[in-house]
Amino acid sequence: MDQPPIQFTNTAPHLLPEEQNGKPIQLPESKAARVNYCLYARKSSEDDERQALSIDSQIKEMALQAEAQSLRVTEIRKESHSAKDSGKRPVFNQLIADIKNGLFNGLLAWNASRLSRCGGDLGSIIDLMDQGKLVEIRTHGQVFTNSPNDKFLLMILCSQAKFENDNWGINVKRGMKTKCELGFRPNMTPLGYVNDYRSGKGQKKVFVDKKRAPVIKEAFEKVASGAPGRDIYNWFAEVSFKTKRGKLVTLSMAYRMLNNPYYCGIFEFPVGSGKWYKGLYKPIINRELFDAVQQKMVVAPKSKPGTKQFDYTKLLTCGGCGSGITAQEKYKQTKKHGRVRYVYYHCTQSRNFDCPQPYLREEKLTEVFIRLLAGITVQEIQNKDTLRTELDRFRRLSAAVLGDAQSDGLGIDLHNFAKYILTQGTRAEKRALIACLEQTIYLKNKEVTTEI
């Protein structure tokens, strides 16, 4: 970011450090000699390609101006950042701080819009001029000092830059709306279509991709016939259906494709706005086929993650693929007990979607945990604040039923205690008891183990 002082030619020797040929140079007490300038160059990061040479050209032109006007440039700073929002440019913010600290008292920039396109940053510059910390601003062909007329002109130029920036955004939106009304979505076409790059501006069309369009149409027909979206994803891989960049279609891309109304000749822009347009291009499928696919792909709304809690989730790891273990509940209507709730634990398949590990009911999982917990000690249980109260209650109950031989707790039946907690305890007590194992617990082939 920081650059050394500019080294100019011998045509202006008083721009070099204060000696030449070993002898000090007597500089005239001019205003230019008292001002230390920082050359600031900026281009918008939103348009890197078209402004690729912008910063270099700004520095070159302003360096020539500095040499011609005998200005002392002590540092060059540059950045690629939009100036439409105040306080967002790190290099500019540091420059303002350095001017406040007296490191510079002059600025060089190609024009006023390079310094500011918003009121906040312009206000910072004007405040520094009012305080006398910023003596002068020079642009290509203009000089701004701490005079009412110069500051007023500077504010007008920066305000004009902001007006142009805001107006540009309005014009772009109007142009996009006009393009939509003409039947063309103002962005890249999806797979199955090809953009026209040869016609002139305003005359570009959209063509059907003869290679990919038949595959996409067949995919819609398969889903309408009952094939799930994952089968379409696998089928795309089998037929080597690839993107324009030569990559295989991902599962999420396949689902987005099957939900994209662009293929039946209509599109929404912007997405989520509720504004629909009829496309001026050839649809790959008809509206009836698209609607049929949407009906097949409708799924029942799911509860938000974390709204349902289960006793043993986040305590187990799949022994088959290393994914986590999750749970789901099912209800069954029975004649004897009415509506019965069942909880099943299974692999999340986050690491392997085809993980074959079977489901395990919560009751079976509880029995396995009871056997595993037989190896822990009373001391390990007493170290858990959540379990200490229940351990004392279970000890008193055992002493009352079995006599005072177990009243000291040393001979407590840990198997019965584990069974009592895992069947009658709270969720927090169950999890605290299982945490006494202090090992990674795996679920594999309906068995719980601490080793794979």
Image (spheres, grey):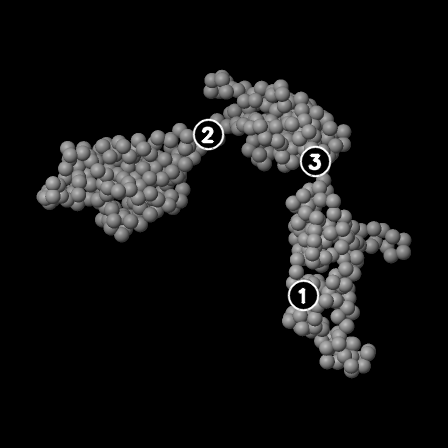
Q: Secondary structure at mark 2?
A: helix
Residue 80 coordinates in the image, percent (x, y): 38, 38
Residue at figure coordinates x 90%, y 53% from the top left:
335
Question: Compared to 11, does 421 lie above or below?
Answer: below
| Label 1 crowd (10 A; few <14 / some 14-19 / many >=20) | some
Decide which of tag 3 and tag 1 comes sooner along the chain. 3
Q: CA distance from mark 2 to mark 3?
A: 39 Å
Which amino acid, mark 2? Val
In this rendering, which labeled residue sits more in front, label 2 or label 3? 3
The disc at residue 172 is 2
Q: Nearer the viewer, mark 2 or mark 1?
A: 1
- Point out the tag, 2 or 1, that comes first from the N-terminus: 2
Q: Amino acid at mark 3?
A: Arg
In the picture, measured across the screen, residue 12 lies left or right of residue 452, that is left
The residue located at (65%, 36%) in the rendering is 251
**In the image as oriented, which residue stretches furthest toward the front?**
452
Residue 193 position within the rendered picture, expressed as x and y whole percent measured from the top left: 59, 23
Q: Is residue 47 shown above or below 437?
A: above
- Residue at image position (74%, 67%) is 374
Q: Secondary structure at mark 1?
A: loop
Q: Residues within 10 Å of mark 2 (few under 14, many from 20)?
A: few
Rendered-image quadrant of the N terminus: top left
Q: Position of residue 451 (x, y in %)?
A: 69, 56
In the rendered view, would you say 253 is above or below 426? above
Residue pointed to by mark 3: 230
Left or right for 132, reference 160 = left
Foreground: disc 3 or disc 1? 1
Report helix, strand or loop for mark 3. helix
- Residue under the point 82% across and 78% down: 401
In-front residue for pair 283/17: 17
The residue identified by callout 1 is 436
